[in-house]
Amino acid sequence: MTRLFTSTGYLEADDQSTSLDLTALPPFLRVLLTTDGTVTKSIESFFWEPVKVVNCGQRYDELEVDAPVIRRNKGDRVLRRSVQLVGANSATCYASAVSLVYTELLPAELRARLESGSVGIGELLRECGLETYREIVAVGEGVAEESLNTSRAIWRTYRIVMEHCPFIQITEYFPLAVYESSSKALNQ
């Protein structure tokens, strides 16, 4: 599996790991795609407003196909969760995300809080002090089938790893129009 941006925040011009032209993207969107941390705080700081994590639905599902990013097989049970990151003042949807969580690896208290649906994954992991790291595995363009956005989007998929075991796969979708307009506003 390809891991992107593990030691740098850019890709060489001859890098074949993605067909997405990262140089053509608004600079802040490039930052969001390449960061190995949660994007909520960065979005709040850039757009200067609180951002709410809106849970659009979650349920336990059996995987219909293998999920190699988190080393899960067809038939394994995962928590599928869809959220939007929405500006509390502007109501702008800055991102949407679809997560697959293999909850069997989580401590019971953490699992219960996640299942309650009241808190974002990044916030929950920060609050509990669980030692994890993120690996970006893909970036691309287009609206995926599971995206919560209907506009053209740039996306990234990453996994969260704990004790060398990947247990969360997250694909985040960033509506390109939001980031293009913010980039134009900065250039005026």
Image (cartoon, grey):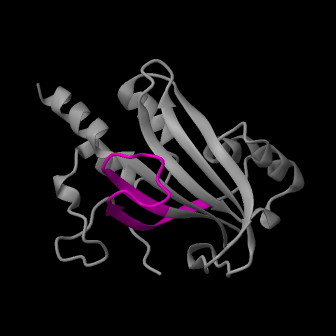
Residue 84 or 18: which is nearer the viewer? 84
> Is 14 on the left-hand or right-hand side of 106?
left
- Residue shown at 45%/61% (left/top)? 145
Q: Is residue 120 left or right of residue 11?
A: right
Which residue is drawn at the image coordinates 37% and 56% (left, top)?
143
Residue 96's place in the image compared with 86, above or below, is: below
Q: Position of residue 60 (x, y in %)?
A: 75, 60
Residue 7 in view of the camera: no
How far from the left and from the top, in percent, is residue 6?
42, 67
Corner quadrant of residue 15: bottom left
Q: Which residues are magenta?
A: 133-157
Q: How many marks?
A: 0
Q: Looking at the image, is 140 positioned above or below residue 54?
A: below
Q: Per the image, is 151 magenta?
A: yes
Q: Position of residue 27 (x, y in %)?
A: 24, 45
Q: Residue at x 69, y 57 (%)?
A: 131
Q: Looking at the image, which residue is at 74% across and 76% down?
A: 76
- Is residue 42 in the magenta section? no
147 relative to 61 in the view: left or right: left
In this picture, residue 98 sits left or right of residue 176:
right
Residue 179 at what x, y percent from top left? 28, 39
Q: Residue furthest left?
A: 188
Q: In which quadrant will I find the C terminus? A: top left
**Is residue 59 at all visible to an observer of this figure?**
yes
